[in-house]
Image (cartoon, rainbow, N blue to C red):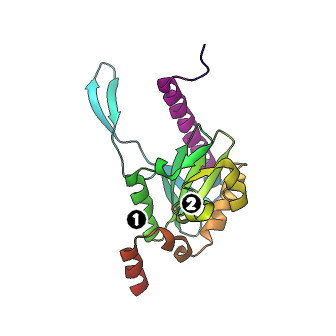
Amino acid sequence: MSNTTRPSTRGRRNTRAGAFFEKQLRDTFTTLETWGICAMSKAPTPLKIISRAEEGVFRARIIVSGQPDFYGVLRGGRAVVIEAKHTGTAQMPTSRLLEHQAEALRRHAELGALTLVAVSFGSLRIGLIPWSEWCNLKAILGRKYVTFEDLEPHGWAVENMPAKLGLRLQQLAELPAEDMRPLCVPPLAQQTMQAA
């Protein structure tokens, strides 16, 4: 018997692991909300109904959405937007962020929101990377992907959810919005912001 996993089995496993990661984040945000740190919501998954059956059962297809996975506000009023990504491999390439997802983070960053990419390399191997750093992984790490081993030296690791995630969100929220946006904003938009 081969020790390789069939692509469809691997895909289902990664989908379940990604859904578990999003559930971890939702549960963590619920805890952080009770602590008064933030109020976060999971963006609904847009569906197109293909066919209906009896008793409320239907078949649907996921429609590509332009909104990030999580959005909300931190204590003090700063908006926060998070795109969550899970991988079953040792590397998370920047290409895992689809163009419309990157554009949504870019738009929110331009308006001063704290924009982050939450990455999961397994249920306990989690990182929270500021969008401005995610866009520049090539300059920071010399490559366009991140590994779990890269998280700790750069302050991106979030091992003890929700406590460490809450602390990290508070630390990032204290940075002025200007410190979080220039690196990932298209040049024309940067000129407009500087002129304002």
In the rendered image, residue 21 lying in the magenta stretch gets the answer: yes
In this view of the protein, can residue 157 be seen by the observer?
A: no
Q: Position of residue 3 (x, y in %)?
A: 62, 21
Q: Residue furthest bottom?
A: 195
Image label count? 2
Q: Position of residue 103 (x, y in %)?
A: 39, 59
N-terminal-most mark, 2 or 1: 1
**Image: magenta residue range:** 5-29
Magenta segment, principal secondary structure? helix
Residue beneath the point at 63% across and 47% down? 28
Q: Amino acid at mark 2?
A: Leu
Q: Position of residue 104 (x, y in %)?
A: 40, 58
**Taking 9 as reference, is 126 above or below it?**
below
Q: Residue furthest top?
A: 1
Q: Amino acid at mark 1?
A: Arg
Q: Position of residue 40 (x, y in %)?
A: 53, 54
Label 1 Cα crowd, 10 Å radius (few <14 / some 14-19 / many 20+): some
Residue position marked by numbered label 2 in the rendering: 137
Q: Secondary structure at mark 2?
A: helix
Q: Nearer the viewer, mark 2 or mark 1?
A: 2
Residue beneath the point at 72% across and 59% down? 153
Question: Dividing the picture into quarters, in which one does residue 174 lie?
Answer: bottom right
Q: Are marks 2 and 1 in contact (CB under 8 Å)?
A: no
In the rendered image, residue 160 lying in the magenta stretch gets the answer: no
Left of 144 or right of it: where is 31?
A: right
Distance of mark 2 from mark 1, alpha carbons?
19 Å
Residue position marked by numbered label 1 in the rendering: 107
